[in-house]
């Protein structure tokens, strides 16, 4: 199916961290849509799904995109079969997520998005606690 081809191409050819915030957000929005609405197709990708998700979220620094990244990680860990994330991938994802700890984000005075440090902490904690495999 075309969804499989889109996801595979996205995961293998797009280096998300090298793009602008807006493009990274679009990639993360698409990734979230794929792992939630097209899970039955993407689960057949097995470990390629986990590796692809990790490549999308690594090195993210924008708080808007971090919230998406943490949510995508939660979905991958909680709702997708274990075969979609190898033990090595699990370790890489754990390192990627824990690299944000501790979160010390303070929104700028002219912030128009309303994201707080508490929002980021809660989303990170939810992602880290979403699977026994992260223990």
Image (tube, rainbow, N blue to C red):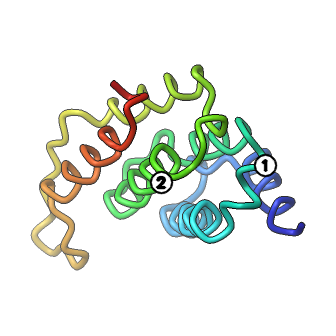
Judge left or right: residue 98 versus residue 22: left
Q: Quadrant of the C terminus?
A: top left
Question: Which residue appears at 48% of the width and 62% of the height?
Answer: 21
Label 2 crowd bin: few (<14), some (14–19), many (20+), radius 10 Å: some
Image coords of residue 64 (percent x, y):
35, 64
Number of disc labels: 2
Image side of residue 8 versus residue 55, left or right:
right
| Position of 52 relative to 21 (above/below) | above
Instruction: Give whichever of discs 2 and 1 has the lower sequence position.
Output: 1
Residue 27 located left or right of residue 21: right
Q: Residue 117's spot in the image, x, y percent?
A: 15, 54
Q: Quadrant of residue 101?
A: top left
Which type of secondary structure does the marked residue at label 1 adopt? Answer: helix
- Looking at the image, which residue is at 63% across and 27% down? 86
Along the line of sight, the residue nearer the viewer: 106 or 11: 11
**Label 2 residue SS:** helix
Q: Residue at x 77, y 46 (%)?
A: 45
Name which residue lies at 43% across and 32% down: 96
| Residue that mark 1 sits on | 44
Quarter of the image where one finds residue 84: top right
Q: Position of residue 5 (x, y in %)?
A: 86, 60
**How far, Cα to Cα, is label 2 from label 1?**
16 Å
Mark 2 near mark 1, Cβ–Cβ under 8 Å?
no
- Name the residue carrying label 2: 75
Q: For residue 85, what is the image quadrant?
A: top right
Tell me: residue 33, above or below residue 126.
below
Residue 60 - label:
none
- In this view, the residue farthest toward the bottom is 112
């Amino acid at each position: 199916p075309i969804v499989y081809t889109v996801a595979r191409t996205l995961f293998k050819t797009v280096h998300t961290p090298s793009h602008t915030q807006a493009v990274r957000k679009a990639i993360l929005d698409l990734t979230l849509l794929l792992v939630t609405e097209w899970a039955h197709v993407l689960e057949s990708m097995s470990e390629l799904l986990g590796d692809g998700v990790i490549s999308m979220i690594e090195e993210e620094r924008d708080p808007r995109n971090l919230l998406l990244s943490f949510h995508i990680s939660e979905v991958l860990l909680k709702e997708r079969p274990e075969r979609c994330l190898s033990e090595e991938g699990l370790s890489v994802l754990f390192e990627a997520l824990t690299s944000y700890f501790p979160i010390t984000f303070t929104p700028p005075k002219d912030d128009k998005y309303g994201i707080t440090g508490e929002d980021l902490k809660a989303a990170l904690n939810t992602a880290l606690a979403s699977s026994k495999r992260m223990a």
